[in-house]
Image (tube, grey):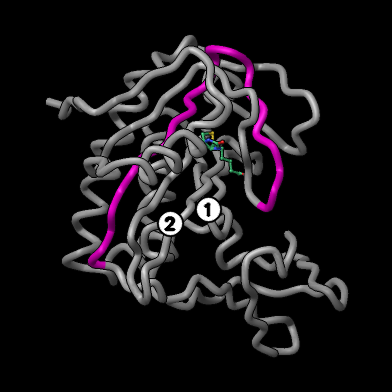
């Protein structure tokens, strides 16, 4: 039976679950796996300063608080890999062709179904706390302004409406098991993440600051950099947002 979770703080409306979680860890000691969940965000945040807009009550919007003090800051990407894999597996319970678009967007049939915003506080070389924010498009079917969106309802209309709490519990069970496995067997997580990458082993056109080129996704470094080998066999390494595809 799925594990139940006691530390869930729920709001009908809030500015951003990540903001609330960040404030909470500044104010007091918060147990690991405390969840902040809401039906609606007035200032939902996405990566690189983007906003995350979501219809009221339609989607899964939450943040998890963790203190992964066992992790070196230089190895923080493993946390992102665990989250992305758990989200991928949760969605793969219902849809085919679910993968992780590097570094941590979840795609179904070439469209984005979920986004992840992880905010780590570092203390020297360790991670003191981590706020893992997740937005999963569930029952919403109309999207305005988002570039390439989809949802569980659009991908599997026959299963709609989805129960949002059940999805949260499913995700948490899977994520917990990846998180603890990553403490025993990092390599297993890394290799599973790699195998589930969007466009893996497919010739594709990429774009960096110099221009467009064709190549293959070939590897991921421990710090999360992406290796693309182009059609002239040249190795090109990228940090997040240095390459578009
Ligand atoms: C992305 O840009 O892909 C990341 C989106 C992350 C959105 C989630 S929704 C819950 C949590 N609170 C926020 O303000 N953002 C994250």
Q: Which mark is residue 104?
A: 1
Quadrant assignment for the C terminus: bottom right
Distance in Å between CA atoms under marks 2 and 1: 7 Å
Q: Nearer the viewer, residue 116 or 212?
A: 116
Out of 139 and 62, give the one closest to the viewer. 62
Residue 21 picture location, percent across and down: 42, 38
Q: Is residue 159 visible?
A: no
Residue 29 shows which numbered tag? none
Residue 185, compared with residue 39, is above or below; it is below
At a point 49% along the width and 74% down the height, the residue shown is 220
Residue 30 in sight: yes
Please check the rendered image and state whether residue 53 is part of the magenta-colored stretch, yes or no. Answer: yes
- Report the side of 239 relative to 177 (left or right): right
Which mark is drawn over residue 80?
A: 2
* Along the viewing direction, whichever of 233 and 40 lies nearer the viewer: 40
**Mark 2: few/some/many CA within 10 Å (<14, 14-19, 20+):** some
The quadrant where residue 71 appears: bottom left
- Asked if the residues shown at circle 2 and circle 1 are in contact, with their CB atoms under 8 angstroms apart, the answer is yes
Determine whether 135 is above or below 79 in the image. above
- The range drawn in magenta is 48-70
Q: Residue furthest left?
A: 1
Residue 237 against residue 160 in the figure, above or below = below
Q: Main secondary structure of the magenta part?
A: loop
Ligand 1 within 8 Å of the CB at mark 2:
no
> Where does the N terminus fall, quadrant-wise?
top left
81 relative position to 220: left or right: left
Ligand 1 lies under 8 Å from the Cβ of mark 1: yes
Which residue is rendered at x = 37% and y = 35% of the image? 90
Vertical placement of residue 112 versus 244, above or below: above
């Amino acid at each position: 039976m799925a594990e139940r979770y006691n530390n869930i703080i729920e709001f009908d409306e809030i500015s951003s679950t990540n903001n609330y979680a960040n404030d909470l860890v500044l104010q007091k000691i918060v147990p690991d796996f405390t969840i902040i969940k809401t039906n609606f965000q007035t200032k939902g945040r996405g990566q690189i300063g983007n906003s995350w807009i979501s219809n009221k009550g339609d989607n899964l919007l939450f943040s998890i608080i963790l203190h992964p003090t066992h992790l070196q800051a230089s190895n923080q990407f493993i946390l992102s890999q665990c989250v992305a894999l758990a989200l991928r597996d949760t969605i793969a319970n219902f849809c085919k062709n679910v993968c992780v678009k590097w570094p941590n967007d979840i795609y179904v049939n070439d469209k984005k179904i979920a986004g992840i915003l992880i905010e780590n506080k570092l203390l020297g070389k360790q991670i003191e706390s981590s706020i893992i924010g997740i937005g999963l498009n569930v029952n919403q079917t109309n999207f305005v302004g988002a570039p390439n969106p989809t949802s569980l309802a659009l991908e599997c209309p026959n299963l709609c409406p989805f129960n949002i709490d059940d999805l949260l519990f499913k995700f948490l069970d899977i994520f917990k098991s990846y998180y603890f496995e990553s403490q025993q067997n990092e390599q297993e997580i890394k290799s599973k993440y790699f195998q589930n990458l969007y466009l893996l082993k497919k010739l594709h056109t990429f774009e960096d600051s110099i221009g467009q080129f064709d190549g293959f996704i070939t590897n991921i470094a421990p710090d999360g950099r992406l290796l693309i080998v182009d059609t002239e066999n040249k190795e090109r390494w990228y940090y997040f947002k240095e390459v578009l595809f």
